[in-house]
Image (cartoon, rainbow, N blue to C red):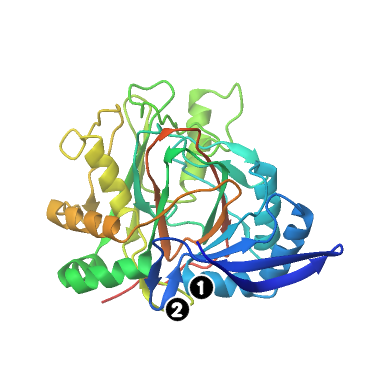
Amino acid sequence: MTVDQPEYQGTYSGNRITLSKIELPNKHIVNGNEFPYALAFNHSGELLDDKVEFLKELGSNGTVEKLLAKHGAVLFRGAGSGSPETFSKLVSSVETARGLKPYEQIGLAGKRNLRAENVFTANEGPKTKRFYQHNEYSRFTIFPSNIHFFCQDAPKVGGDTPIAHSIEFFQRLQELYPEIIEKLSQKKLKSSQFYPSREGKISFKGNEFYWQDKDGFGHLIKEGDSEEEKRRKAEIMVRKLTSDFEWAEDGGLLVHQYVPFIRIHPESQLPTFFNTLVGRYGAKKDAGATEFPHVGTDGGYYAPLVYEDGEEIDKDLLEKVLQVSIDLEYNHEWQEGDLLLVDNIQVSHGRQPWSEGERVILVSMWDNDVIPEVYKA
């Protein structure tokens, strides 16, 4: 890893803070730009309040906005000690300076816990489980414009975070399989997600989540509410996303939304493969749930992948898209204190399994209220 001369610098409380360009091994070049773009602080774990002020200035003067629009993902190495409070201070300073607001999670499908203000653990599913590429909450009609990551504890073996540039994803599919782009630009995905009930028969073992959860649809539920009242309150939250849902016999909740596969990035005006198709298919495949009755080895129900008109998505198409996503991945090997800012609209992410050491990656999601236009071929 080579280090260049400082690119950004400032003085706060008498302390000079600098950020120098660094080269990451195996970085990608997308449309002539490095992916991800990486900068390193001159001090690691020191001068936190000064770094907070420095990042605040980079946020308010448009530097972070320009870097994210150009590169999609920006790494700040040596941002501070790996703690949720550190991450909260750093990321809040940047995003509030940019005029963004915290994203309200509705319909969380996974284990994720609050650790500090606007800071959550990443999905806490089993460490042997691979998460495939997906843009955060792209299975929904409402999603964050940005999702940022911070490394509290880096695993010793494995546990990289693979990210892929969704604009490059579109371009590669257009080059290799123009018929797929043609098909997906004319259709929407019927995005169906099953939320088990705490009292039901179905549960995603090792990655348990329920519709009653606070970040599921249980935001309004209070202790002592009757089952009827819990459902009524849950439906209020569901209807913020969709009016198409159904209750299962065992008390579970199946939610349907209809979302495009491809959008237009608001800054570059380039098509971006913004969806959760790979993430959903990879999970179904690994769980052995691609065929009826679509119940996986983990006990969870994986709804069929179909278009809005009910047509089943061809398995050959799914396999091709999955392979392209894997080919395009940059696998980020974490170091404690890494701060990775990600433009969710043009960058997807996943998670590699790990075998040794503790892995604690924190996330923070922010929104600018901009809904990108849908791409039409």
Q: Which quadrant of the view contains residue 301?
A: top left
Q: Is residue 351 above or below residue 8?
A: above
* Residue count near mark 2 (Cα–Cα under 10 Å), binned few <14, some 14–19, many ≥20: few
Residue tagged 2: 268
- Mark linked to residue 322: none
Q: Give the secondary structure at mark 2.
A: loop
What x and y, as percent, mark residue 44?
67, 52
Is residue 209 among what the camera can see? yes
Nearest to N terminus: mark 2 or mark 1: 1
Distance between the Cα atoms at labels 2 and 1? 7 Å
Residue tagged 1: 69
- Residue at horizontal 71 percent and vertical 59 percent from the top: 93
What x and y, as percent, mark residue 312?
16, 51
Q: Is residue 143 above or below residue 110?
A: below
Residue 142 appears left or right of 200: right
Q: Which quadrant of the view contains residue 170?
A: bottom left
CB-based contact (under 8 Å), mark 2 and mark 1: yes
- Residue at horizontal 42 percent and vertical 47 percent from the top: 160
What x and y, as percent, mark residue 77?
59, 57
- Image quarter where the C terminus lies is bottom left
Q: Is residue 47 above or below residue 193?
A: below
Q: Is residue 174 above or below residue 228?
A: below
Kindly give the residue lying farthest to the front in the view shown: 2
